[in-house]
Image: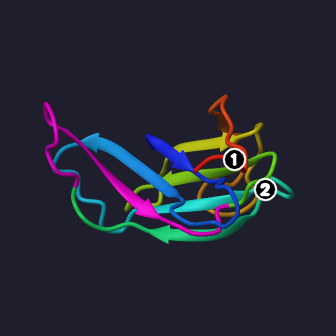
Amino acid sequence: MNEIHYDNSSTDTNEGIEIAGTAGTDLTGWTIELYNGNGGTVYSTINLSGTLADQQGGFGTKFFAKSGIQNGSPDGLALVDNNGDVVQFLSYEGTLTAVGGAADGLTSTDIGVSENSSTS
């Protein structure tokens, strides 16, 4: 995961997650599981689709919009491949341990930055 936008000023619009990787990667069957830091459970899942285009030097990105990404302290997200394996488990505003979902029992990596409600 390359970019996470989760906390806008006023309403939860234009929020989402950008995936970066090798051009040609087919995201069919991949998901992003969103985790609530209060209890560590999955509160939403984003089903991914499409292929990463070659935007520069054999790499590409794709943005997946998602309204209502939690603004908690902490919350997290797991990128899960089409085999059900966790590729990346990140969190913001602290770390958490997943309870359930593909990341069950894993501790997240805090990205070390946060947004506040003045972000647009």
Residue at which label 1 appears: 118
Is 82 displayed left or right of 75 in the figure?
A: left
Eye-nearest disc, 1 or 2: 1
Quadrant including the N terminus: top left
What predominant SS class does the magenta segment belong to? Answer: loop
Q: The disc labelled 1 sits on which kind of residue?
A: Ser
Q: Is residue 45 above or below residue 53?
A: below
Along the viewing direction, whichever of 14 and 82 lies nearer the viewer = 14
Quarter occupied by residue 81: bottom left
What residue lies at 49% left-to-right and 52% top-to-bottom?
A: 79
Q: Are marks 1 and 2 in contact (CB under 8 Å)?
A: no
Furthest residue toward right: 38
Q: Secondary structure at mark 1?
A: loop
Q: Earlier in the sequence, mark 1 or mark 2?
A: 2
Q: Where in the figure is residue 109, as x and y percent of width and height?
A: 65, 34
Along the viewing direction, whichever of 3 and 81 lies nearer the viewer = 3
What residue lies at 17% left-to-right and 51% top-to-bottom?
A: 53
What residue lies at 60% left-to-right and 42% top-to-bottom?
A: 90
Q: The disc labelled 2 sits on which kind of residue?
A: Gly
Q: Where in the figure is residue 116, as x and y percent of width and height?
A: 72, 44
- Magenta segment: 52-69
Is 83 displayed left or right of 100 in the figure?
A: left
Quarter occupied by residue 23: top left
Q: Is residue 75 above or below residue 109?
A: below
Q: How many marks?
A: 2
Q: Which mark is residue 40?
A: 2
- Residue 102 in the magenta stretch? The answer is no
